[in-house]
Image: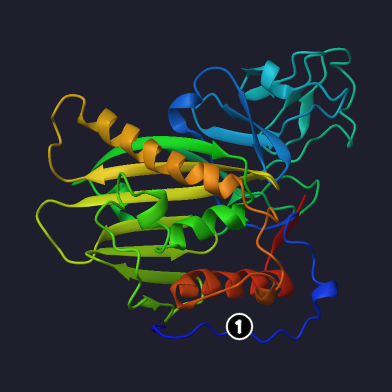
């Protein structure tokens, strides 16, 4: 589908008042929570969808993820350490396996471990220099079966050896939906980024060409010589829309820390100047600069998440990609897709 002239509001079967609030409801998906290099010998704690998780490496160096607080007295498990391949609580030494089950209580080493001595375990992956968590509550307190989580699919460029990837990240005080909309918005470039990437971009949008064909989860925007591709709910890529020998890409992925904070992880990738000292630092810093230009504006938006009805904000043809995103978000809210509620 190519939309160039009009913005069509979706027809909604569910009354607005019966919708769950999108401020506290998020899609269940793979979200990055840390860089792989951050997790070494000591466990670390990270927050995602309003929940605290502890990450640690077992005796084989494989990353594991549990809820962050001990089932005994609620101590922070990231204060502990890995012992015999298990995560040991710093308070009373209880040892938790990767399944979340406690397998050793030092105060009663010869007594059976009670069934309630467990914490939730979550699927976790390392991919493209990042640690990703799948925050599903499926199975409740049962031991985690990581193989039941869907495949983690990232853009192929992230694993393409032709590209040198310069990493960067930022945290915004903004709802996930507002942050996603900011990267689908072409019309703001001439204003928010007028001294950087938008300095040669005209303010007038004569034709908005975007595609949402083949999958409801993909939005593609043709903008100048670039192709912006968004994959619901959390990944976005900018790449050249034609093949050249020297290629530059920019990738970002969004993780909802809670309803008011979103963390952005990104890579500025290139196939040129691969061995020039300091070049990756320049690309990382410039990418952060672009994000920070957006940050103040996005953090100022009210209401904090996107409104639950298109009519609550004005729209023009230049907003077509954002309108398509809102349609997809509302389909998620009103449908049967897996959800995590804060």
Q: Can residue 155 be seen in this view?
A: no
Instruction: Give residue 246's position: percent from left, percent from top.
Output: 12, 51
Residue at the image point whose x is 82% and y is 13% from the top: 92
Q: Quadrant of residue 119?
A: top right
Q: Is residue 71 visible?
A: yes
Number of disc labels:
1
Vertical relation: 140 (above or below) 242: above
234 sits to left or right of 198: right
Residue at the image point whose x is 63% and y is 19% from the top: 84
Mark 1, residue position: 9
- Element carrying mark 1: loop
68 sits to left or right of 183: right
Vertical relation: 24 (above or below) 169: below
Q: In which quarter of the image is residue 48?
A: top right
**Figure coloring:** rainbow
Q: For this rendering, which residue is in front, 247 or 298?
A: 298
199 sits to left or right of 85: left
Disc 1 packing (10 Å; few <14; some 14–19; many ≥20) = some
Vertical relation: 78 (above or below) 274: above
Q: Which residue, as the protein is rendered here, is positioned at the far left?
A: 245
Residue at the image point whose x is 52% and y is 49% from the top: 254
Instruction: Give residue 162's position: percent from left, percent from top.
Output: 18, 47
Instruction: Give residue 81's position: percent from left, percent from top.
Output: 64, 16
């Amino acid at each position: 589908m190519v939309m160039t002239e009009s913005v069509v509001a979706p027809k909604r079967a569910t009354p607005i008042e019966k919708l769950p609030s999108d401020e506290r409801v998020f899609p269940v998906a793979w979200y990055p929570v840390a860089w792989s290099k951050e997790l070494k010998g000591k466990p670390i704690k990270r927050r995602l969808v309003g929940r605290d998780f502890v990450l640690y490496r077992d005796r084989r160096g494989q990353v594991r993820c549990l809820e962050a607080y001990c089932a005994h007295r609620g101590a922070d498990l990231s204060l502990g350490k890995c012992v015999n391949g298990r995560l040991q609580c710093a308070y009373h030494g209880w040892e938790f396996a990767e399944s979340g089950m406690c397998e050793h209580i030092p105060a009663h080493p010869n007594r059976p471990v009670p069934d309630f001595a467990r914490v939730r375990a979550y699927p976790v992956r390392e991919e493209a220099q990042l640690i990703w968590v799948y925050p599903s509550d499926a199975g409740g307190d049962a031991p985690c079966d990581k193989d039941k989580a869907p495949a983690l699919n990232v853009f192929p460029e992230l694993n393409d050896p032709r590209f040198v990837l310069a990493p960067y990240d930022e945290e915004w005080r903004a709802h996930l939906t507002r942050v996603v909309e900011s990267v689908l918005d072409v019309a703001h470039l001439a204003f928010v980024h007028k001294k950087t990437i938008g300095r040669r971009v005209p303010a007038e949008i004569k034709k908005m060409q975007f595609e949402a064909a083949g999958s409801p989860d993909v939005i593609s925007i043709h903008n100048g010589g670039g192709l912006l591709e968004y994959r619901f709910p959390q990944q976005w890529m900018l790449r050249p829309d034609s093949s050249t020998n020297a290629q530059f890409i920019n990738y970002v992925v969004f993780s909802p820390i809670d309803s008011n904070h979103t963390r952005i992880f990104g890579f500025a990738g290139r196939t040129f100047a691969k061995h020039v000292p300091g070049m990756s630092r320049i690309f990382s810093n410039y990418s952060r600069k672009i994000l920070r230009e957006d940050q103040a504006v996005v953090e100022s938006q009210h209401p904090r998440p996107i409104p639950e009805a298109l009519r609550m904000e004005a729209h023009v043809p230049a907003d077509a990609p954002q309108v398509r995103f809102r349609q997809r978000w509302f389909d998620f809210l009103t449908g049967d897709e897996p959800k995590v509620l804060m």
